[in-house]
Image: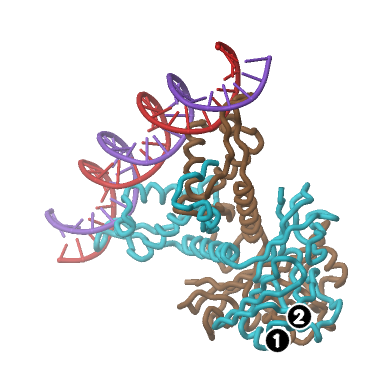
Chain colours: A brown, B cyan, C red, D purple
DNA sequence: CGGTGTTGTGTCGGTACCGACATAACGTTT
DNA sequence: AAACGTTATGTCGGTACCGACACAACACCG
């Protein structure tokens, strides 16, 4: 993960490790389905009853039941409850509840990827703009990014998992692909893990461009420090945020 | 389960508009910097004093001050306060506070992009795995994605802003690129906005692949329904989540 | 027909949080 | 020297939330 430490922050005092995080939610009808609710549903699925689920989670039954009613009012029926019967009854998740959980998990997974992937952030200035897309002048040259309105001094952040590398020789002409940002550079470092490799590419800007590619791609391209490559990334995947 | 309350919501419950959302946070030393804290800092920057800032936000001064102390204990000094003086003093943000705000905004911006961009999710089954990367068999063929351990039935989600399109003719078959997932397909729809275009590509799977590209790229490629294209996306940008 | 363990519903007390308020310290300006 | 509006600190009362508890309804089973 990037740990900040760019653009001269006078970090004289304590250098507290600040970690990005998030909380994923699903909204419907004014109530928000959060991580606790997901845990409740999963516990119900495991335990087979709301009572046991609340117990497992260390929460009170009455609260759990109240919360569940609230959720069902907003998201539709989530559990099929049965009282009486052998063992007194029980509750099982409905298909809708499972879909909700899956949706929640997909969102969480996607956000996790963004929050913890490495990224390179370049200071720059907006020199042109059409609609949401701005052309930004940076140390590495001009690039295009999604930008909020009314800002000229920006940071451009390029997530490492959106950068694709190509051999500088066999690179196809720019016109035939939809990746509008292309930069020639040389590989500075290449750390190959078991299945994933992190590559930094010198493209002229102060922080080198960092790319996250599969180890297999790294092998196929024969990446080595000093090698000439073309790094490209889509403008719809790179974002500018106001600097001031 | 009862759902029996009338008002014909048996179908309305199905179409419950559930909206993904999130809350961005920065953690340090056990305290979490959230949206409220960001608003507080921004209000201080605007008003020039903690007192006026708390007033503007409709919050109590004592609470705001207490919270600020807490934050400074974890993140370092955030405001330069001066009591006495013309007007009684005031508070201004330190460079560290501005850096923190910028970091927060970058994270928020990145997460926003993920949360609200279109995506295509395909059911599939893991058929192979090396480390974090799994090969998944889907309706469109085999693709590679990051996957959590121990799951075979998965959903693969491909975010629209990570899909790049190429002309099917000019695309070198096995070009030396690090985008490992490549699918030939035909354009089904192409909606061109002012600066961004949303394209759906039929690649054999039930939900068509949706790609978000710049309007300029759409023009350059001459995208039209029925056109043959190659859609490619990096495996480090696509994620699999457990389906069961 | 009673036993069983659950769902469904309500009430009560404790706790954590928050806003309101009071007060001291402070230093520049008048 | 007095005035001013801020920072800095503490206390108090209200409120919202939560866990604990009580109790009725239920339906299957021995």
The answer, for residue B76, to whether it is visible in the render is: no
Write the residue at 59% across / 39% down: A80
Callout 2: residue from which chain? B
Write the residue at 31% across / 50% down: B60
> How far across and how far down the image is residue B120, in percent?
67, 65
Q: In this view, does A148 lie above or below B71?
A: below
Write the residue at 47% across / 64% down: B98
Viewer-proximal residue among A42 and A230: A42
Viewer-proximal residue among A153 and B224: B224
Write the residue at 65% across / 88% down: B219
Local secondary structure at mark 2: strand
Q: Give the crowd class for mark 2: few <14, some 14-19, many >=20 residues within 10 Å.
A: many
Would you say C19 lies left or right of A41 here? left
Callout 1: residue from which chain? B
The CA distance from mark 2 to mark 1 is 9 Å
Q: Residue B202: which disc?
A: none
> How far across and how far down the image is residue A239, in percent?
58, 72
Precedes in sequence: disc 2 or disc 1: 1
Return the residue at label 1: B221
The quadrant in which the N terminus of chain A is found is: bottom right
* Same chain shared by disc 2 and disc 1: yes
Q: In this view, does D16 lie above or below A173?
A: above
Number of labels in the image equals: 2
Q: Quadrant of residue B212 in the image?
A: bottom right
Q: Is residue A94 above or below residue B57?
A: above
Q: Give the crowd class for mark 1: few <14, some 14-19, many >=20 residues within 10 Å.
A: some
Q: Do the residues labelled 2 and 1 touch (CB within 8 Å)?
A: yes
Return the residue at label 2: B229
The answer, for residue B54, to whether it is visible in the render is: yes
């Amino acid at each position: 993960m990037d740990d900040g430490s760019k653009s001269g922050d006078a970090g004289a005092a304590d250098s507290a490790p600040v970690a990005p995080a998030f909380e994923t939610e699903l909204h419907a009808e004014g109530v928000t389905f959060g991580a606790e609710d997901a845990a409740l549903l999963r516990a119900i699925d495991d335990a087979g009853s709301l009572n046991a689920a609340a117990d497992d989670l260390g929460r009170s039954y009455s609260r759990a039941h109240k919360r569940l009613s609230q959720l069902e009012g907003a998201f539709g029926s989530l559990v099929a409850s049965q009282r009486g019967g052998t063992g007194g009854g029980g509750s099982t998740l409905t298909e809708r509840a499972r879909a909700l959980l899956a949706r929640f998990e997909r969102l969480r997974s996607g956000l996790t990827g963004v929050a913890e992937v490495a990224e390179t952030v370049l200071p720059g200035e907006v020199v042109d703009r059409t609609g949401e897309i701005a052309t930004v002048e940076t140390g590495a040259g001009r690039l295009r990014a999604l930008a909020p309105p009314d800002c000229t001094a920006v940071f451009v952040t390029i997530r490492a998992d959106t950068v694709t590398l190509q051999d500088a020789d066999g690179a196809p002409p720019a016109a035939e692909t939809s990746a509008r940002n292309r930069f020639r550079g040389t590989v500075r470092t290449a750390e190959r893990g078991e299945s994933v490799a992190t590559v930094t590419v010198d493209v002229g800007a102060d922080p080198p461009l960092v790319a996250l590619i599969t180890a297999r791609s790294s092998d196929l391209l024969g990446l080595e420090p000093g090698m000439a490559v073309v790094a490209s990334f889509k403008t719809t995947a790179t974002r500018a945020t106001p600097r001031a």
